Amino acid sequence: MHEIEPYYNWRHLYNAEDDELSPFYGVEHSEFEFSNTVYNYYIHPQWDEFGSRTLYLKVLFADYELNYAIIELIGEWNDAVENDIMQLKRSVIDPMVAKGIYKFILITENVLNFHSSDRDYYEEWSEDIKDNGGWIVAINMPEQTQYDFRRSHIDHYVRLLESPNWRTFQPQDFFHSIDNQMLFLT
């Protein structure tokens, strides 16, 4: 897992550590010190922690004029034991919503497992953004993780979509392709 880096080809366009509106403004990363783990496996030091011991993320892009963010996740999404959705909602999502972000693209291809609890924070997140036409999309979630999402009915709040070639897009083009799909799905 230590070799899986957050997607880096947009870093010349956006860097959350340099964005004064980002919850990760001013965070410094080492390129060589591996300290965070998932299942006792070290993960790359570029991933950001937000209060979970099993799930990490990287804000790949945020556009405050078009009101969207692209966030990549890695690890185990564990609401049952770690209450990851509460940590994510309070530490990352709430500050972003307060800055005008209400469309969220979650890159979830490295989310290995999902353990559900209740749906309250998903419902709250959905309520927070719906008046602005907001939505939450999970892209390329592994099949077994999708199964657990659907079984818990989290997919009522987080749309599960596939975009196998998302890395070939520029962030704004990727957002527009997802936004257009969401227009037809809602």
Image (spheres, rainbow, N blue to C red):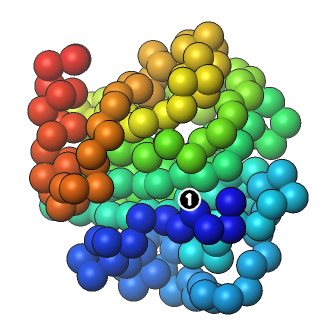
* Image coords of residue 115 (percent x, y): 73, 28
140, above or below 183, in the image: below
The part of the image, by quadrant, that contains residue 104 is top left
Residue 175 position within the rendered picture, expressed as x and y whole percent measured from the top left: 20, 48
The residue type indicated by label 1 comes to Leu
Residue at horizontal 63%, vertical 14%?
152
- 183 left or right of 149? left
To which quarter of the image does residue 82 belong?
top right
Give the mark count.
1
Question: For this view, does 27 lie left or right of residue 67?
Answer: right
Element type where label 1 sits in the image: strand
> Along the horizontal axis of the image, is 100 left or right of 66?
right
Residue bearing mark 1: 57
Residue at point 60%, 42% (across, down): 111
Going by the image, does 149 lie left or right of 186? right
Q: Residue at x 79, y 76 (%)?
A: 35
Position of the C terminus, as image quadrant, is top left
Q: Position of residue 153 (x, y in %)?
A: 56, 13
Q: Residues within 10 Å of mark 1 (few under 14, many from 20)?
A: many
The image quadrant where one finds the N terminus is bottom right
Depth check, front residue: 162 or 68:
162
